[in-house]
Amino acid sequence: MLKIIFWIYTLVVAFLSFYPVPETPTSDKLNHFIAFFIYPILFRFSYKKGYLDTIFFSLLFGIFIEAVQYFLPYRSGEIPDLVADLFGILSGAFILFTLDLMKNK
C-alpha cells in the first residue's frame, strides 16, 4: 500500500511540475522544499532503502524534474529550484535519521 501512495505522490509532483501554471501565491522555492521533504520519507518507508539510496534517488527525481522543465516552453528548469529540492531531501532524510535514533533508544 505504501508503494502505491509513493507512486501516486510521484505522479502528482511530476504533473504539477510539468503542467503550465500561472504564478503561485506561495513561494516557488517553498513548494519545491515541501515536495522534496516528503519524497524521501515516502521513498524510504515504501522501499526500505538506506539513507544514501534514499537521498540519491530523491535527488535523481529532482534533477529529472528540472531537466524536463528546462525544455518546456512554459516552465523553466532552474538551479535554485534544484537547491530547494536538495534542502528538502536532506531535511526529510534528517527527520528519518532522527526517528531511527529515537526508535533505537
Image (cartoon, grey):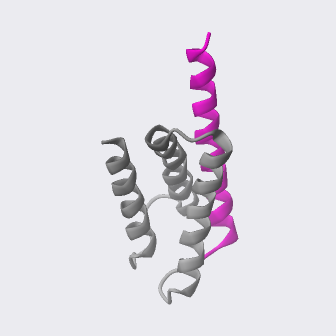
In the foreground, 37 or 63: 63
Q: Which residue is painted at 38% across and 55% down in the image?
A: 7
Q: Is residue 85 magenta?
A: yes
Quadrant that contains the C terminus:
top right
Q: Quadrant of residue 98?
A: top right
When asked about the image quadrant of residue 21, the answer is bottom left
Q: Residue furthest bottom?
A: 73
Q: Which residues are magenta?
A: 76-105
Residue visible at 49% across and 53% down? 35
- Where's residue 68, x and y in %? 54, 79
Image quadrant in which the N terminus is located? top left
Task: Tell me the residue at 51%/38% (across/down).
Answer: 48
Regarding residue 47, the answer to whether it shows in the image is: yes
User: Residue 86 colored magenta?
Assistant: yes
Which quarter of the picture shows residue 103? top right
Residue 50 drawn at (x, y percent) = 62, 39
